[in-house]
Amino acid sequence: MQTVYLVASGDLRLSANQVCWPAQEAMENQIFEAVKREGVKIKRAHPYIDEKKHGFIDSQKYGIEVFRKIPADAPVIVAEAVWQYSHHVLPGLITHKGPILTLANWSGQWPGLVGMLNLNGSMTAAGVKYSTLWSENFTDDFFVKGLRAWLNKGKVVHKTDHVKPYDAVEVPSAAAAIGERYAQDLMKNKAIMGVFDEGCMGMYNAIIPDALLMSTGVYKERLSQSALVAKMRTVSDAEARGVYEWLLNKGMRFHLGTDEATELTEHQVLEQCKMYIAAVRIAAEFGCATIGIQYQQGLKDMAPASDLVEGLLNNVDRPPVYDEKTGEELYKGQALPHFNEVDECAGLDALVTNGLWTRMKMSPETTLHDVRWGRWYSGPANDNGRHVDDFVWVFEISGAAPPEHFIDGYAGAVSERQPPMYFPLGGGTLKGVSKPGWVVWSRVWVQPGKLNFDTGICEAVKLPDAETQERLKLTTEQWPIMSAITPGITRDQLMARHKANHINVAYAPTKAAAKKAMFAKAAAMKALGLDVSFCGEF
């Protein structure tokens, strides 16, 4: 085999690249040793840059320059121990002729798994062929066999026999009828998706081409985050204070300090309350049934984080917002589904979930989580004496988590300052531990010219507090967390199939109700023209 070239896509933010570089460097050393053990030469395609204090590809411009120097047919490893911006390397990968392997360390720290899954989804959406692997120490049999296969054959094939196409499953007629009727109504009445600046953090897989989205009856209203900031300036201090007091009266806690650079302050929270009011008013003005705020480049330099806002929007029970002119309460008694990081695939999913769950008289709240990490857990769970002996995922996201999904709701929610390396102007999260229960999970994903939909059921479990706190410390402790078991889907099967960093979840009151809702949603998506698959045991 020719020389293998290694590239590493990083963040656009210098602070994040500098903080995360040691983890990336440590992983790359392990990868170099693993490849050399197979008798193959490996070369880093771009250097560590002293003045930047990291060795990441940190822009699309730089990524294009790097790939110009890589032989067109050479094997390329994209190694990720961090969150990364896929568009930094996507132009080079789209035109590359040699075999491509994406590779991540099995760690929740920064996180490389999430970055790799996003890149995988983005390449899938772009029609790029690739293989993918992951490992905790890069010496286990799963990794070594996979690496050897890729080095020798140019590809790795994973087992995905947990996936069943819609037509291979006997879908109950009653559930199918609910989903099909909803799809017919959506196609007839149509819905508007409000998009506050498209393409967050280079997530190409999070953009649904207009023609594909319009075929489902949903149409984009392209909005600007500058308009959101402008609308925030029209919200009075008294209105913002009213939202804040409403949350305090619900029992929500805020971990406040005085240092704007490193702590959550009341000023930051009040600015987030203004953003919440502004977002609802803009959504109503344009008739949006769902909205997505990008909150990254640009807005991060103008306002505190949007995460508190996103979680409130996704909750039916939330602070009231009134029309500036008429005084009418907007979206009264409803959630306004928000899709984090403008992930339009998650937006379509949340819109359908909200409609179907409401029709089925179930709480319609949704959370868009990252598939962050996970490990085996053996011990008690759910406070009922039950013993769990299974792989338990950490689903975790910075925003979009509604209090309805938490143990004790608002009283179990706390807002903590976002990490400064990502969020220079601060802002609080909406953090909580997801309540135990049965959940429908799903993902809309894009292939060239086609929309797909994967779904299944999982069980959110309540782990002992010590285990939950350790999982938070091993990931991002300021963020909301769900501990989830995916019946009939192993760790490696989920990683091999999932074409996104995000996964949508919605609760059902019982396992039977979750199965019915899953079938109804699958039928709705199929009627909307998506290619539907069921995953795991149900």
Image (cartoon, rainbow, N blue to C red):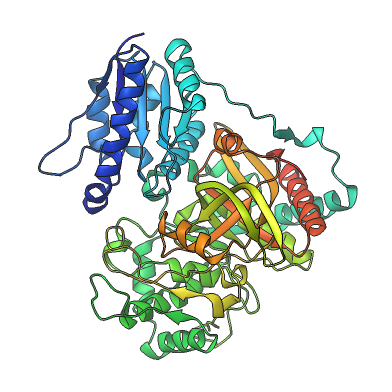
Instruction: From the top left corner, tell me how far across and down residue 258 is, in percent.
Output: 25, 81
Q: Which residue is drawn at 41% across and 65% down?
A: 478
Q: Which residue is drawn at 48% across and 41% down?
A: 205
Does residue 190 show up?
Answer: no
Query: Based on the displayed image, in which of its 4 quarters is residue 278 positioned?
Result: bottom left
In the displayed structure image, the side of residue 262 where residue 507 appears, left or right: right
Query: Based on the displayed image, in which of its 4 quarters is residue 165 positioned?
Result: top right
Instruction: From the top left corner, tell me how far across and down residue 21 is, in percent.
Output: 25, 43
In depth, the one of 111 and 429 nearer the eye is 111
Instruction: From the top left corner, tell me how far across and down residue 419 is, in percent.
Output: 32, 62
In the displayed orientation, state which residue is furthest to the top. Answer: 1
Q: In which quarter of the image is the C terminus?
A: top right
Q: Is residue 133 above or below residue 269?
A: above
Q: Which residue is drawn at 33% across and 13% down?
A: 40
Query: Based on the displayed image, in which of its 4 quarters is residue 507 positioned?
Result: bottom right
Instruction: From the top left corner, tell me how far across and down residue 509 is, in percent.
Output: 76, 65
In the displayed orientation, state which residue is furthest to the left. Answer: 51
Q: In which quarter of the image is the N terminus?
A: top left
Q: Residue at x 68, y 66 (%)?
A: 364
Q: Is residue 383 above or below residue 103?
A: below
In the displayed orientation, state which residue is furthest to the right. Answer: 173
